[in-house]
Image (cartoon, grey):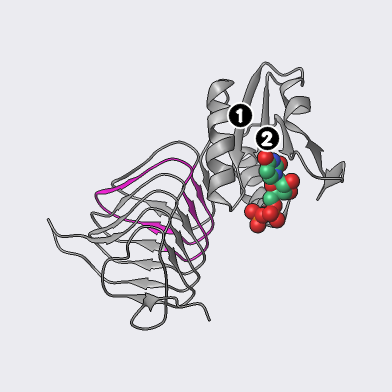
Amino acid sequence: MSSKIYGLYGASGFGQEIMFWFARQLERAGDNSRVVYIDDGSDKPVVDGFDVLNYEAFLAQPEPEKFATIAIANSVIREKLDHKLQRDGIRQIPVCGDYSFVRGATLAEGSILSAYVDITANVSIGRCFHANTYSYVGHDCVIGDYVTFAPRVSCNGNVHIEDHAYIGTGAIIKQGLPGKPLVIGKGAIVGMGAVVTRDVPPGVTVVGNPAKPLVRS
Ligand code: UDP
């Protein structure tokens, strides 16, 4: 029996999307350790052929070396689980789908890049970053912790994105300038297809082209 076990945290929609890459990268690395889902709310014992264990059951497995990656889109849950994994000394491994590239960038623990993601030069990214398929991060971007990119986000160079921001499918973020980045504030939401041409304050949702704060009727 291998001394290692790998858990993908989240057996719901996003987790099921990512399991393919998670299991495949281990297989390609020649690591035939056990791969499971970790999920505290699932009523299914098996999903797509992988056992589903709650966190306590995962901890109780016999393999002494435990690794996990959090595949849950909600960034607040991600932060909570990240703290739990750190507390318990469980290392998070990055997931990188096919045709995704990280060049000259640093990513903190727990990142998930789906397929066809391009992270370019002089980029710095915080904990548990999620980038869905066909997303781009231009040069000199600084991205905080628990940030989420839906598919096809185009984040041009010199953009700063603060913790917990969510960038919707197909959003385009205008390039900032060296020393004067375009800033997307903490917890801000950029709607699907928005074209962001100026800073977004913390906690604000913007939509449209050019993107403006969402006024709820
Ligand atoms: N979940 C969990 N522990 C938590 C919070 C959530 O295991 O503390 C699981 C939850 O049971 C669910 C998944 O995370 O299966 C989140 O699924 P959801 O469909 O809400 O989101 P997505 O898969 O799109 O991220």
Callout 2–callout 1 Cβ contact below 8 Å: yes
Residue drawn at point x = 58 percent, y = 28 percent: 85
Does 43 sit left or right of 73 as displayed? right
Q: Which quadrant would residue 88 be assigned to in this image?
A: top right
Using the image, determine if residue 176 lies above or below residue 8: below
Does 96 sit left or right of 139 as displayed? right
Mark 1 neighbour class, 10 Å CA radius: few under 14, some 14 to 19, many 20 or more: some
Query: Residue 196 or 170: which is nearer the viewer?
Result: 196
Q: Is mark 2 within 8 Å of ligand 1?
A: no
Using the image, determine if residue 87 lies above or below residue 129: above
Seen as rendered, the residue at the extreme left is: 179
* Image location (x, y in percent) of residue 154: 38, 69
The magenta-colored residue range is 111-135
Does 159 sit left or right of 206 as displayed? left
Indicate which disc residue 182 carries. Answer: none
Using the image, determine if residue 60 lies above or below residue 33: above
Tell whether position 58 is magenta. Answer: no
Q: Is residue 209 visible?
A: yes
- According to the picture, the residue beneath numbered tag 1 turns out to be 67
The amino acid sitting under disc 2 is Gly
- According to the picture, the residue beneath numbered tag 2 turns out to be 7
Residue drawn at point x = 78 percent, y = 43 percent: 41
Magenta portion: prevailing SS class: loop
Separation (CA) of disc 2 from disc 1: 6 Å
Residue drawn at point x = 59 percent, y = 44 percent: 77
| SS assignment at label 1 | strand
* Image location (x, y in percent) of residue 129: 46, 48
Question: Which mark is first along the chain, 1 or 2?
Answer: 2
